[in-house]
Amino acid sequence: MTARPANAHQARLLRLLRDGGPNSRAQLGDQVELSRSKLAVEIDRLLETGLVVADGLAASRGGRRSHNVRLAPGLRFLSVDIGATSVDVAVTNPELEILGHLTEPMDVREGPVAVFEQVLALADKLKDSGVAEGFDGAGIGVPGPVRFPDGIPVAPPIMPGWDGFPVREALSQDLGCPVMVDNDVNLMAMGEQHAGVARSVRDFICVKIGTGIGCGIVVGGAVHRGATGSAGDIGHIQVVPGGRQCACGNHGCLEAHFSGYALARDAESAAVDGSSAELAARLAAAGRLDAADVAAAAAAGDPTSLTLIRDGGARTGQVIAGLVSFFNPALVVIGGGVTGLGHTLLASIRTQVYRQSLPLATGNLPIVLGELGPAAGVTGAARLISDHLFSPA
């Protein structure tokens, strides 16, 4: 990518073309507050930069036909969504449509050097498949708090060895393009906002329940990261006073009582102590259990698994109810690996939130599962880097 928009008008035009696809000059003029002559100047400047290209004549609206323009079709964004136990790498076009998507198991505890070797190998595989020759920018999500302006993880509880690692700087050098880094749940929220269940919503929260638990907060259409980048770290809100010790060092955190890790531990305990024959059979067959095993056992009618899901949903709902009363969102989105638990989990969360929050906040509040699944994070990563590149230099 050779250029950035020179001003806010050009940035707005680029984002409109990203979000709406090819469009006519006349229709773009309807959406931005510019005179026809000023609009023509800004589009001509974008055409000169190569960020935008002509795309034929638009449909007639009466009178002289307008010309279509679109983002340069050769632009490519690399999207990386690093989880605790897997990594997703994708390539998108400038309208953020996914052209190639690879996922592999990965242990974030191996540290940044090993993880990024795997990321770069997957990026090379995508290049070799022909979807990209190079990258104009890259968005990266990591499962922990990030000091956003610098792209640096800060004391992430489930990421030993990552504290202070210059992710943005290191990957920018390796990839040869601009890089932006954010918490993975913020990217999930941005993905659902761009192409998922939150497309038409300006104020919502997106709760990711995976190995850990986090919350993306979108206010007025923009992610709210807080003063230092740690907004939405709800996994470490206490739900059981004096409860289990959490990876963060405190006791009784939501994450310690209900997350992918906590659920697997509780399921294995139930299998070993004989309270669930279904889980015991699965443990004997596989040697370990995870959230998918609990979901399958619950679907088979196992009472212990159903109780684990309902109790976890109630505790998560307890925290979300507090957020709803405080923030009054228009929508709550639930995503992450544990959403394989499906409607049993969702029903438990809904019951707790509707019971605990004020009627004014919940009277018209949808609480829904995310639409995009594993594509949410990589879509959000592309949105993150394109927001950066489609901003005035």
Image (cartoon, grey):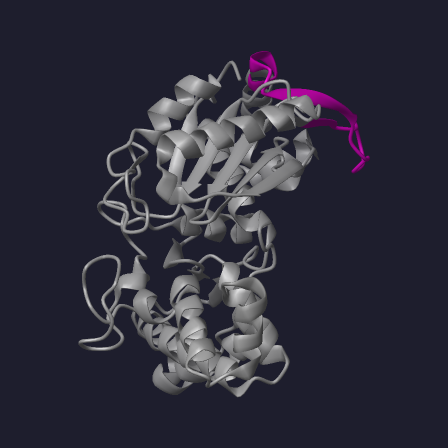
254 and 110: which one is in front? 110
Asked if residue 127 lies left or right of residue 262, the reply is right
**Which residue is pictured at 74% across the width and 24% down the height?**
55
Determine which quarter of the picture holds residue 250.
Answer: bottom left
Asked if residue 154 lies left or right of residue 178, the reply is left
Relative to 363, does residue 265 appear above or below in the rendering?
above
* Residue 177 covered by magenta stretch: no
Q: Is residue 343 visible?
A: no
Relative to 187, does residue 98 appear above or below in the rendering?
above
Question: Among all residues in the image, which is located at the extreme front?
Answer: 284
Q: Is residue 361 visible?
A: yes
Relative to 3, does residue 60 appear above or below in the rendering?
below
Q: How many marks?
A: 0
Give the residues in magenta.
Answer: 46-69
x, y percentage for residue 284?
A: 55, 70
Q: Which quarter of the rendering shows the C terminus?
A: top left
**Which residue is pictured at 44% across the width and 30% down the height?**
116
x, y percentage for residue 383?
A: 51, 39
Relative to 230, does residue 127 appear above or below in the rendering?
above
138 and 269: which one is in front? 269
**Which residue is pictured at 51% across the width and 13% down the height?**
2
Determine which quarter of the picture holds residue 160.
Answer: top left
* Residue 54 covered by magenta stretch: yes
x, y percentage for residue 327?
A: 33, 66
x, y percentage for residue 100?
A: 66, 35
Asked if residue 273 lies left or right of residue 230, the reply is right
**Which residue is pictured at 78% across the width and 38% down the height?**
61
